Amino acid sequence: MSSPVVTRFAPSPTGYLHIGGGRTALFNWLYARGRGGRFLLRIEDTDRERSTPEATAAILRGLTWLGLDWDGEVVSQFERRDRHAEVAQQMLARGTAYKCFSTQEEIAAFRAAQEAAGASYAVFQSPWRDADPATHPDAPFAIRMKAPRTGETIIDDQVQGRVVIRNETLDDMIVLRSDGTPVYMLAVVVDDHDMGVTHVIRGDDHLNNAARQQMVYDAMGWQIPVWAHIPLIHGPDGKKLSKRHGATGVEEYQAMGYPAAGMRNYLTRLGWAHGDAEIFTSAEAMKMFDLSGIGRAPARLDFKKLENTCGHHMAMAEDAALLHELQAYLAAAGRPALTERQKSLMLQALPFLKSSAKTFPELLDKATFLMVSRPVARDAKAQEALDTVSRGILKSLTPRLHNASWTKEALEPILTGVAAENGIGFGKLAAPLRAALSGRTVTPSVYDMMLTIGREETVARLSDAAS
């Protein structure tokens, strides 16, 4: 019986959660969740000078916004340093590592001599690798892993294929420094082993690390996980994604107003494909997602495709959930929160507002008629639409609305009747109506606005405009 799938996301807390890191976390989450496995989170905070609690908090916020829930407690790599050192000592006891007393000056001189001799690789070969322990001095030492000197290390990668690395290019990696602190390469392997990680899905910038990390597994007699190194995300121009392309942090996308479900869908499709599937829910993605669908070439960020994907998800969303996420967006963007009345009106309006919006700013723009208060401020085009003739027509309309049934079926003949009486089509009446109700000439349907804000507010706004 095969062991349950365990994946992990292991960011360094030196800044915000990059969009590439968000996609890596998403791939790990989908792969584990789709197989009834576990998705773990580890913060690789061994670099004490660059790691900050603020960055850790930003990473957790970004993952939470994306909807990526993890199993168990968040693991701190730094807090496990004693365990990492313990494994280095075990390697020493197993004979797969050795004490190295070489100084920095000796290592630098060795490499300089190799380079001067024209060596292809200036790989340090410690004189202490096979030294008799009786010759060991009473001096500080590092613990180095015994790397194979000949042959090849093979990485069987689920995305990159069979990767061959010549062992002569690999040095005897230090696993424990002379001050007793473990190195990152060792810590990663020990943590992955202890956490039961079965699949390491990460960026292909870690591919070269896999050879050295695989040797740590071998040195300890541990099972090597399944490797899957995914290409990085590039900008629309094919170059490595950077600030000049636009937002690179996950939280920036929330503040820009993209819905999380749309972002998950888009990031899933960014470098992964399953037939012709383009728009899907996370539940559907979990069933479809596999490593074989990941391409080897870097994926290019396409903001237009992102917006289109998000538009589909806004239209598909449950109204109450969309309202909840809208409120979270307002907080993230530093915009005023909705009043209780605005929340109530927004919930009524979402069925017709959400179908044509791709982001929350677009949704709010279409919902302007809900947000304004009397007297309604008007833009230049709205003011132009409310000329003397139009105001007179609105003045004759308002008394007929006082006792009308407040349904589209009842309102339609009243509005079209007033238009006909004045020798105009309904389209000509709609412009001043839009201007009076929202202060703009581009709005949702006149009927949708009237039914949402109600009779009293509709009559009051029309009366203000007609005066």
Image: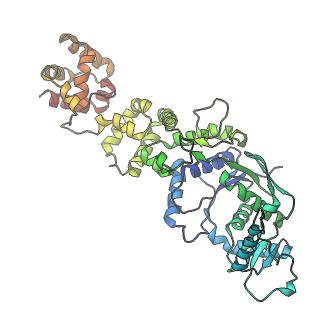
Q: Residue at x 74, y 81 (%)?
A: 141
Q: Quadrant of residue 147?
A: bottom right
Examine the rendering and report whether any part of residue 68 can be seen: no
- Residue 411 lies, in percent from the top left, at 28, 19
- Residue 321 lies, in percent from the top left, at 47, 41
Q: Is residue 464 above or below residue 238?
A: above
- Residue 298 lies, in percent from the top left, at 63, 43
Q: Residue at x 70, y 50 (%)?
A: 229
Q: Residue at x 20, y 25 (%)?
A: 385
Examine the rendering and report whether any part of residue 43 can be seen: yes
Q: Quadrant of residue 13?
A: bottom right
- Residue 132 lies, in percent from the top left, at 88, 82
Q: Quadrant of the C terminus?
A: top left
Residue 385 horizontal side relative to residue 250, left or right: left
Number of marks in the rendered image: 0
Closer to us: 186 or 279: 186
Q: Residue at x 84, y 49 (%)?
A: 1
Residue 128 horizontal side relative to residue 291, left or right: right
Closer to us: 83 or 400: 83
Residue 256 horizontal side relative to residue 91, left or right: left
Q: Quadrant of residue 279?
A: top right
Applied colour scheme: rainbow
Closer to us: 12 or 400: 12
